[in-house]
Image (tube, rainbow, N blue to C red):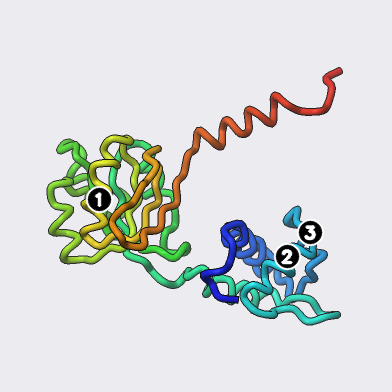
C-alpha cells in the first residue's frame, strides 16, 4: 500500500508499536505473536495484522513477528534516524521542559536552536543550547535550514510567526500554542497540534461518566 493511502489512525498507532516492541527487545524477547502483542497493547490481533500489512508482510504463520526486525522496520517507517533539524520557539516553563526532557535524537529530530522574545532569557543555556533572540531567527534559518518548529508560545504569537517560518523553510510544526493552523501557502505543511488541556478534559469526562455505581 502506498504510504499516502495509509490512514491517520494507523499512523498514530505506529509510535505505540515502536515503543512496545522496543521494550520487548530490551527484555530479550525474540519473537511475539499478534495475539500476544494485542493483549499487551489493548488492540485486537486482527487490527495489528491489518495495521502492519499496510507496510508489507512481516509475520510468519506459526512463528509470529521477529521483535528486533519489526522494531527496526517501524523505526525506518517513522524516520527515527532522520535527524530532522528542529527549532523551539518559546523558552518559558513548557518550552524549557520540552527541550530538557524530550530526547529529540531518539524520535527522528535534532534540536538545533531555541528562541525567545524576552531579552532576559536570551543567552541562557537549555539542553546545551543557548537561547537566542527572536530577531535572529531569520538569519539562523537561512544559515542552518531547520525543517521543523516546536511552538511553545501564546496563540496570537504563533499566528503571527507561523507564516514567516513557512517562508523560511519550516515544513512541520509541533504546536503547543492552541493556534489551529490554517495554512494557505500552497506548500505541504505537517502540523501536529498538542492540546494538553483537551486531554485533561477527556480524562474529566471519563471520571464523571463512569458506569460503575459508587458504594
Given residues 119 and 156, the one toward you in this image is: 156
Q: CA distance from mark 2 to mark 1?
A: 39 Å
Q: Is residue 98 above or below residue 70?
A: above
The disc, 2 or 1, on the residue closer to the chain's N-terminal end is 2
Front disc: 1 or 3: 1
Q: Secondary structure at mark 1?
A: helix
Residue at disc 2, secondary structure: helix
Q: Residues within 10 Å of mark 2 (few under 14, many from 20)?
A: some
Name, please, the residue furthest toward the top: 215
- Does the CB distance between marks 3 and 2 fall below 8 Å? yes
Residue 202 higher or lower than 146, as above or below:
above
For discs 2 and 1, the disc positioned in front in the rendered view = 1
Using the rendered view, name the quadrant where residue 68 is placed.
bottom right
> Which quadrant of the view contains residue 170?
bottom left
Q: Position of residue 90 (x, y in %)?
A: 29, 42
Give the residue displayed 22% in from the left and 58% down from the top: 167
Q: From mark 1 to mark 3, how far is it between C-alphas?
A: 42 Å
Q: Tell me which label, 1 or 3, sits earlier in the chain.
A: 3
Question: Where does label 3 land, which residue?
Answer: 44
| Residue identifier under label 1 | 163
Give how far apart the Cα atoms at labels 3 and 2 are: 6 Å
Question: Can you tell which quarter of the image residue 3 is in?
Answer: bottom right
Mark 3 lies on a secondary structure that is loop
Q: Considering the image in quadrants, where does the C terminus appear?
A: top right
For label 1, count other residues whose C-alpha is less than 10 Å away and answer few (under 14), some (14-19) or many (20+). Answer: some
The quarter of the picture where the N terminus appears is: bottom right
Against 52, is 14 above or below?
A: above
Image location of residue 132, percent across then percent down: 18, 49
Q: Residue at x 71, y 71 (%)?
A: 28
Vertical position of residue 159 compared to residue 27: above or below: above
Amino acid at each position: 500500500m502506498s504510504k499516502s493511502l495509509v490512514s491517520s489512525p494507523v499512523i498514530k498507532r505506529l509510535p505505540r508499536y515502536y515503543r512496545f516492541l522496543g521494550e520487548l527487545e530490551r527484555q530479550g524477547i525474540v519473537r511475539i505473536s499478534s495475539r500476544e502483542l494485542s493483549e499487551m497493547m489493548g488492540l485486537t490481533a486482527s487490527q495489528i495484522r491489518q495495521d502492519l500489512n499496510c507496510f508489507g508482510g512481516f509475520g510468519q504463520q506459526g512463528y509470529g513477528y521477529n521483535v528486533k526486525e519489526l522494531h527496526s522496520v517501524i523505526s525506518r517507517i517513522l524516520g527515527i534516524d532522520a535527524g530532522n533539524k528542529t527549532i523551539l520557539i518559546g523558552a518559558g516553563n513548557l518550552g524549557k521542559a520540552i527541550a530538557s526532557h524530550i530526547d529529540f535524537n531518539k524520535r527522528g529530530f535534532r534540536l538545533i536552536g531555541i528562541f525567545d522574545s524576552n531579552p532576559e532569557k536570551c543567552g541562557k543555556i537549555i539542553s546545551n543550547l543557548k537561547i537566542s533572540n527572536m530577531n535572529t531567527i531569520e538569519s539562523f534559518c537561512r544559515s542552518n535550514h531547520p525543517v521543523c518548529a516546536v511552538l511553545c508560545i501564546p496563540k496570537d504569537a504563533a499566528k503571527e510567526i507561523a507564516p514567516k517560518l513557512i517562508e523560511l523553510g519550516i515544513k512541520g510544526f509541533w504546536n503547543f500554542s492552541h493556534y489551529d493552523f490554517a495554512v494557505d501557502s500552497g506548500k505541504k505543511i505537517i502540523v501536529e497540534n498538542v492540546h494538553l488541556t483537551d486531554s485533561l478534559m477527556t480524562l474529566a469526562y471519563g471520571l464523571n461518566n463512569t458506569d460503575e455505581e459508587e458504594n
